[in-house]
Image (cartoon, rainbow, N blue to C red):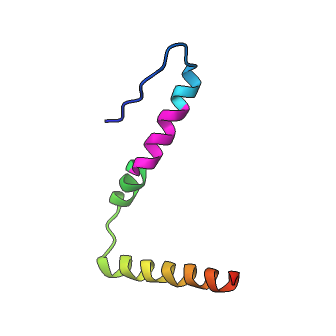
Amino acid sequence: MIIIPIKEGENIERALKRYKKKFERTGALKELRNRKQFTKPSVAKRAEKLKAIYVEQLKKAEE
């Protein structure tokens, strides 16, 4: 459960913005979407390797 302490005289929009940011950082929504459908471990590993290759190519291109 996420708890956001609201300071004296703080705007509700600002508190809501802090709550949304904190909620996004927890990764709860991302995990929920991942759990909606099952992905085989081999497919997940392949996707992870492809992402690592892509990031590596970006770093090489930057140099």
Residue 17, by quadrant, is: top right
Seen in the picture, residue 14 relative to 62 is either above or below; the reply is: above
Inspect the magenta stretch and tell me whether residue 23 lies in it: yes
> Which is the main secondary structure of the residues drawn in magenta?
helix
Number of disc labels:
0
Query: Looking at the figure, which quarter contains the N terminus?
Result: top left
User: Residue 44, percent across and down?
Assistant: 37, 76
- Residue shown at the point (51%, 34%) measured from the top left: 18
Spot occupied by residue 6 in the image (x, y as percentages of width and height)? 46, 21
Q: Quadrant of the C terminus?
A: bottom right
Image location (x, y in percent) of residue 26: 40, 48
Task: Residue 43: give x, y in percent of width and height.
Answer: 37, 79
Q: 13 and 6: which one is in front?
A: 6
Q: Is residue 50 left or right of residue 13?
A: left
Relative to 4, does residue 44 appear above or below in the rendering?
Answer: below
Span highlighted in magenta in the image? 17-27
Q: Is residue 56 left or right of residue 42?
A: right
